[in-house]
């Protein structure tokens, strides 16, 4: 029996009046790297934002390390040890690179020290005095990932970290994500780029119309390629 | 040879000093307005009333409790800042999701109520507050009252300290980040609603501090903030909303321009700031230091 870190059950969520999630359910074991795959509008980002508490109108259950988070505001959810890297990266233009890195407060012991973060992302150290948004797209993505490693959060929610980036950068981000898994981080990765997702994940959940419709183990991916293409419409 | 273009030098420097003192108040007040607007998205029309409350608090502390000026300089901003915190918790937090207009109506209405109450209780004639530092210095070209010199220095220190706090500290980084993207900052584990309350309290305390400093120079009266705050809004528009250094530089600069105008062409001194505002808006609609979004 493996140790479940995050269990999402019958999760429903709304943006205003529109009902986006219709009973999402999946789970992630401690130290696992799991992806949410699906087309645009399937509800992947909304699922992350609901786990994080950014989408406030939600029902059902999201248990993190045994604690129910539905109903709590996002700052207290973050303090349980969940960190979020948004799709739009959310780099602050009024903060320098270093200030961006230092912004998220420590929530638990055991975060990476700054020296290790700069070791993973040497570019960021060189440019630590620059304005955050003056970085290239790839560097901004690394900054967005780097700044959530310091806080001691053990579950990382990464929303399409490879979107719009050059292949060589995508490769680099893939290496970093694998390293983070080795260091013991549990990762929930939202991806449209299935080829990328297949290189890093233990398991894939497929979403359609606000529901999880399928689960594919990494070992079964080769047999399920046709099915996946069908789901993702590629 | 004490004149340039037939303007006697002592008169010129006298007016420039007055301008500098006015500028000190413009800077402190517009700074608070800029910080509050950046974080709350509310244009705080209660600012003038809160400045008046600062002066009144110091005056009441002196006359009823014999608390001296120097203690009031700390206590009055604290008391008025706490009052600001209560206003934010009870009233302002209910309107953040609404249009700017609601913030305007709420804060403007609050100012009218507060000023009305003080006018009803203490009248509008005003009460004197004794100068805490008597005397002055003869600088050769002009006479400098010691207290006024102190006000200029104190305002500069307060402005620079605020700038440092916002631009160079951890808490300031939270504040700048939350001004840009409060949702994400909250999702990092920072209690943004508390940060907003704190920011409003700080902005209000700054206004009250300016009020305490103004008490010995002006009469302490219920309406002392109403005219001043009009000019301060023009200063904020000229400097650009949300820029800290912009507010400071524009505040002092416009005070000087106003003083200078008083020497060259006195009738224009009340309007010169609004003329500058119109000119700046024509050239840079976001203000001198503002960024277009």
Image (spheres, rainbow, N blue to C red):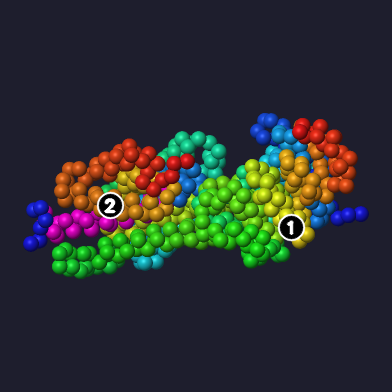
Relative image position of residue B280 (x, y in whole percent): 32, 41
Nearer mark to the viewer, of 1 and 2: 1
Name the quarter where the N terminus of chain B is drawn: bottom left
Relative image position of residue A1 (x, y in whole percent): 92, 54
Looking at the rendering, which quadrant does residue A79 occupy? Answer: bottom right
Instruction: Calculate the distance from the C-alpha at mark 1 to the C-alpha at mark 2.
Output: 56 Å
Q: Which residue is mark 1?
A: A180
Relative image position of residue A15 (x, y in whole percent): 67, 35
Relative image position of residue B265 (x, y in whole percent): 16, 45
Q: Which residue is mark 2?
A: B255
In-image side of B188 versus B26 (left or right): right
Q: Chain of mark 1?
A: A
Q: Which residues are magenta?
A: B7-34
Main secondary structure type of the part rendered in magenta = helix
Looking at the rendering, which quadrant does residue A147 occupy? Answer: bottom right
Q: Crowding at label 1, few (<14), some or many (≥20) Cα neighbours within 10 Å? A: some
In-image side of A216 versus B102 (left or right): right
Tell me the tag on residue B262. none
The total of numbered circles placed on residues is 2
Nearer the observer, B12 or A110? A110
Element assignment for label 1 = helix
Element assignment for label 2 = helix
Q: Is residue B10 found inside the magenta-colored segment of the image?
A: yes
């Amino acid at each position: 029996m493996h140790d479940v870190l995050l269990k999402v059950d019958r999760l429903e969520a709304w943006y205003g009046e529109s009902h986006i999630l219709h009973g999402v359910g999946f789970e992630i074991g401690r130290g696992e790297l799991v992806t949410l795959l699906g087309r645009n509008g399937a509800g992947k980002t909304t699922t992350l934002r609901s786990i994080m508490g950014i989408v406030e109108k939600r029902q059902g259950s999201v248990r993190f390390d045994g604690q129910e988070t539905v109903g709590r505001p996002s700052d207290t959810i973050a303090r349980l040890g969940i960190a979020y890297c948004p799709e739009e990266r959310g780099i602050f233009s009024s903060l320098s690179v270093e200030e961006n890195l230092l912004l998220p407060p420590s929530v638990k012991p055991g975060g990476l020290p700054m020296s290790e973060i700069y070791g993973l992302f040497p570019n960021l150290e060189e440019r630590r005095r620059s304005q955050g948004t003056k970085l290239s797209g790839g560097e901004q993505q690394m900054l967005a990932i780097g700044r959530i490693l310091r806080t001691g959060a053990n579950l990382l929610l990464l929303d399409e970290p490879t979107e719009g980036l050059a292949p060589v950068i995508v490769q680099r981000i893939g290496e970093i994500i694998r390293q983070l898994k080795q260091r013991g981080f549990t990762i929930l990765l939202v991806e449209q780029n299935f080829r990328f997702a297949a290189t890093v994940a233990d398991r894939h959940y497929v979403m359609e119309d606000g529901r999880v419709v399928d689960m594919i183990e990494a070992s079964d991916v080769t047999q399920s390629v046709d099915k996946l293409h069908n789901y993702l419409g590629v | 040879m004490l004149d340039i273009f037939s303007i006697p030098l002592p008169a010129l420097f006298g007016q420039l000093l007055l301008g500098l003192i006015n500028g000190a108040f413009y800077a402190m007040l517009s700074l608070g307005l800029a910080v509050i607007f950046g974080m709350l998205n509310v244009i705080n029309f209660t600012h003038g009333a809160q400045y008046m409350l600062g002066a009144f608090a110091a005056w009441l502390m002196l006359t009823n409790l014999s608390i001296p000026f120097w203690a009031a300089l700390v206590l009055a901003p604290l008391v008025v800042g706490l009052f600001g915190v209560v206003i934010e918790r009870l009233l302002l937090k209910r309107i953040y999701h609404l249009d700017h207009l609601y913030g305007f109506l709420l804060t403007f209405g609050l100012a009218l109520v507060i000023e009305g109450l003080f006018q009803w209780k203490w009248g509008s004639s005003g009460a004197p507050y004794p100068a805490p530092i008597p005397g002055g210095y003869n600088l050769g070209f002009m006479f400098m009252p010691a207290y006024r010199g102190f006000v200029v220095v104190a305002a500069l220190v307060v402005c620079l300290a605020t700038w440092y706090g916002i631009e160079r500290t951890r808490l300031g980084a939270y504040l700048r980040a939350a001004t840009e993207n409060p949702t994400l900052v909250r999702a990092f584990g920072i209690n943004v609603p508390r940060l907003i309350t704190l920011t409003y309290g700080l902005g209000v305390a700054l206004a009250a501090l300016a009020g305490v400093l103004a008490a010995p120079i002006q009469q302490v009266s219920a309406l002392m903030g109403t005219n001043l705050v009009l000019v301060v809004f023009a200063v904020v528009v000229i400097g650009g909303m949300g820029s800290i250094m912009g507010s400071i530089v524009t505040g002092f600069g416009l005070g000087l321009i106003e003083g200078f105008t008083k020497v060259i062409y006195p009738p224009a001194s009340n309007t010169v700031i609004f003329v500058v505002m119109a000119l700046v808006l024509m050239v840079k609609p976001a203000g001198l230091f503002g960024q277009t979004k």
